[in-house]
Image (cartoon, grey):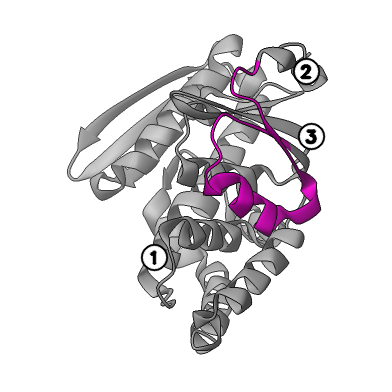
């Protein structure tokens, strides 16, 4: 039996919950056991699997840890250090998400370079003591944005920078469709997406689309609000908007097959 313990401060409960649920779901099919407990201001996630499944389990754990650092930790770092002029909430959400995903490939490389899965991994210690170069990289991007904050007061300049960031993100999906209903927005793609892309708010939709970064977005709207206009503004020609109150005509849309 191969075993690994991952510990996270109780202050980062959302991180611990994400790691536990992700690894448990993705390793169950090949006999891994995942449990967790809390002790001395830390949450411990224990993973055990047959020795012959160590390689597959390690890959899943590594990807999960990298995602956690590039999303949860980077978002917290941005929130603590980024100082931008006031814009409406959807714009700021989009800008922060674009920064989180900007040059993600290099972030992945830096984390994987230092990450070792050897019996015990204290995630907060790993982040603060091993990933100094990663935080310095993030700080350079934030400093550039903060130093140009006066310029970004202008909506036009702000959106020019936002579009530049989005245009330089790695494409994650070829084509996706967005459907609006009474519960909000849901995203569908040729390869199945998880339930986290269902019943999204406007801000949640914008954030998810930037993370997925598709080549083409088919947006089916029930209402004529500012969501379609905002998405068209930041994704430009990638967005195809269709207003259809009943949505009956798109039940057999090819992307869903």
Q: Which residue is mark 1?
A: 79
Q: Which residue is mark 3?
A: 175
Tag 2: Cα neighbours inside 10 Å, few (<14), some, or many (≥20)?
A: few
* Residue 154 at x, y percent in the picture: 54, 80
Query: Does the magenta segment cover residue 235?
Result: yes
* Residue 214 at x, y percent in the picture: 75, 42
| Stretch in magenta | 218-247
Query: Does the magenta segment cover residue 12?
Result: no
141 sits left or right of 201 in the view: right
**Closer-to-camera residue (234/143):** 234
Q: Residue visible at 54% across and 41% down?
A: 205
Q: Residue visible at 54% across and 34% down?
A: 223
Residue 128 vertical position relative to residue 245 in the rendered view, above or below: below
1 and 3 marks in contact (CB < 8 Å): no
3 and 2 marks in contact (CB < 8 Å): no
Q: Residue visible at 41% across and 77% down?
A: 83
Q: Earlier in the sequence, mark 2 or mark 1?
A: 1
Residue 6 vertical position relative to residue 182 in the rendered view, above or below: below
Could you tell me if residue 1 is visible in this image? no
**Closer-to-camera residue (120/158):** 158
Q: Residue visible at 36% across and 69% down?
A: 80
Q: Which residue is mark 2?
A: 253
Tag 3: Cα neighbours inside 10 Å, few (<14), some, or many (≥20)?
A: some
**Closer-to-camera residue (63/237):** 237
Circle 1 — which element? helix
């Amino acid at each position: 039996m191969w075993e690994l313990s991952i510990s996270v401060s109780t202050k980062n409960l959302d991180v611990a919950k994400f790691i536990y649920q992700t690894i448990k779901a993705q390793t169950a099919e090949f006999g891994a056991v995942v449990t967790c407990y809390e002790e001395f201001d830390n949450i411990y996630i224990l993973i055990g699997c047959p020795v012959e499944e160590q390689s597959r389990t390690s890959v899943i754990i590594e990807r999960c840890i990298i995602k956690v650092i590039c999303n949860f930790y980077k978002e917290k770092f941005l929130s603590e250090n980024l100082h931008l002029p006031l814009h409406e909430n959807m714009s700021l959400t989009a800008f922060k998400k674009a920064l989180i995903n900007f040059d993600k490939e290099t972030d992945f490389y830096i984390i994987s370079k230092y990450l070792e899965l050897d019996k015990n991994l204290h995630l907060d210690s790993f982040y603060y003591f091993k990933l100094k170069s990663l935080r310095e990289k993030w700080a350079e991007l934030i400093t550039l944005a903060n130093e140009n904050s006066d310029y970004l007061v202008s909506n036009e300049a702000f959106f020019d920078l936002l579009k530049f960031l989005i245009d330089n993100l790695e494409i994650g999906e070829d084509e996706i469709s967005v459907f609006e209903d009474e519960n909000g927005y849901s995203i569908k793609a040729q390869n199945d997406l998880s339930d986290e892309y269902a019943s999204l708010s406007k801000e949640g939709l914008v954030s998810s689309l930037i993370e997925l970064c598709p080549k083409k977005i088919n947006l089916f709207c029930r209402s004529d609000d500012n969501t379609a206009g905002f998405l068209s503004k930041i994704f430009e020609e990638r967005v195809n908007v269709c207003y259809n109150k009943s949505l009956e005509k798109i039940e057999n849309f090819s992307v869903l097959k």
